[in-house]
Amino acid sequence: MNPPPLVTTAASPWQPARRAARMNPSVIREILKVTERPGIISLAGGLPSPDSFPIDAMREATTRVLRDAPREALQYAASEGYAPLREWVADQMASHGMRVSAAQVLITTGSQQGLDLVGKVLIDPGSRVAVEAPTYLGALQAFAPYEPEVVTVPCDDDGPLPEALHVAKGSRFLYMLPNFQNPSGRCMSEARRAALVRSARAIDLPIVEDNPYGDLWFDTAPPPPLASRWAEGTVYLGSFSKVLAPGLRLGYVIAPPELYPKLLQAKQAADLHTPGFNQRVVHEVIRDGFLREHVPTIRARYQAQRDAMRAALEAHMPSGCHWRVPSGGMFFWVTLPAGIDATALLPRAVELGMAYVPGAAFFAAEPQHNTLRLSFVTVAPVQIARGVELLAQALKSAE
């Protein structure tokens, strides 16, 4: 057997593009590697509960698709997406006050791809993009390679301040998650949505509305989407990950007719089309109203886990800590006493046996280092209680 070749120290011939320097690893994904260690109670990852996956329905739908349309399901497909699934999405939007044609629906490989397509089509190097504070880390990652100047709109517990929207004037768009935001968990009131749309229209500021969590409400459904108030000025992103299964990588973009062709061309260049087999299976599952019965079971499960985390925080967290109790979604946002750095505290928490996501990564600028995100949906109530107790121990050791 020949010996392996020697590793040389010669300079690499590869020259990465400038945009590659702006790509950074996901803090959350890196933390998830830590949580794979045995015995760690992870309150970090924003993963749906696998106990909510409709495995039997998926198995039956897969059988029907392979029985009734095997060649079509396994062949290349239209870049726009499977027509019956696009029509289903358009019909569903009517219940949210949106008048949408299937011709405006683009099926994407997860809503994360939708963010990338929006960035690719709308952002030039140096152009401005406005975001909330805090905001979804994955959006910052998706936009970063296109080299925007990111502007942060001041926020309160109800979301961006309409009177502060002037700081975003001239931006290519304002990116928002109105429903149970990742990471803060806040849900924007109807009055705030109306005021924001008025302010955005007044300064010709388009909106990118991301709604992966809107169906996961606990007591009351959230107000109608921003897109229902300004259809021609809003790109709307949705996902099947939180109500079915994230492994399917299935989302969608609803775009104004004048913007849709460019998003479609960007999609064609990226991956030709989202897997047609997955689209057909999902449509087979949902077409007869399955979600009307399935999603309430997810809500009930998550509400019980939300209540367990609220009780644990109230029982164990030391004075000086603050949090918002979410009315839906998957996350608690916790503010620690001033002077405590959640990133620096994380190794101690992991040493004790729990993990969370430090909040600083969710800020485009001026990060709040004394913040962190806790996810409650993948851990049983007894583990939630123990995980929060260990977090409190880590905090007390840092005082």
Image (cartoon, rainbow, N blue to C red):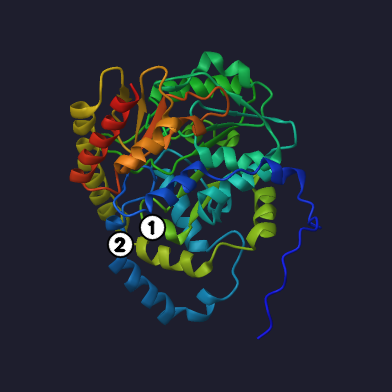
Q: Nearer the viewer, residue 219 or 45?
A: 45
Q: Mark 2 — residue?
A: 54
Q: Do we see residue 330 in this rendering?
A: no
Tag 2 or tag 1, which sits nearer the N-term? 2
Kind of residue at disc 2: Pro
> Element at badge 2?
loop
Q: Do we see residue 333 in this rendering?
A: yes
- Crowding around mark 1 (Cα neighbors within 10 Å: few <14, some 14 to 19, many 20+) is many
Kind of residue at disc 1: Ala
Residue 290 - label:
none
Q: Nearer the viewer, residue 369 or 229?
A: 369
Please tell me in which quadrant of the rendered image residue 397 appears.
top left
**Picture residue at 60% right of the left edge, 72% below the top:** 76
Residue 135, given in percent of the width and then of the height, sits at: 50, 32
**Picture residue at 40% right of the left edge, 22% below the top:** 340
Q: What separation in Å lies between label 1 and label 2 (alpha carbons)?
A: 8 Å
Image quadrant containing the C terminus: top left
Residue 164, given in percent of the width and then of the height, sits at: 55, 15
**Picture residue at 47% right of the left edge, 23% below the top:** 368
**Picture residue at 51% right of the left edge, 49% below the top:** 111
Residue 173, given in percent of the width and then of the height, sits at: 62, 31
Q: Mark 1 — residue?
A: 245
The residue lying furthest to the bottom in this view is 1
Residue 136, given in percent of the width and then of the height, sits at: 49, 37
Mark 1 in CB contact with mark 2 (< 8 angstroms): yes
> Element at badge 1?
loop
Residue 110 to residue 237: above or below: below
Residue 60 to residue 11: above or below: below
Residue 48 to residue 222: above or below: below
Residue 386 to residue 194: above or below: below
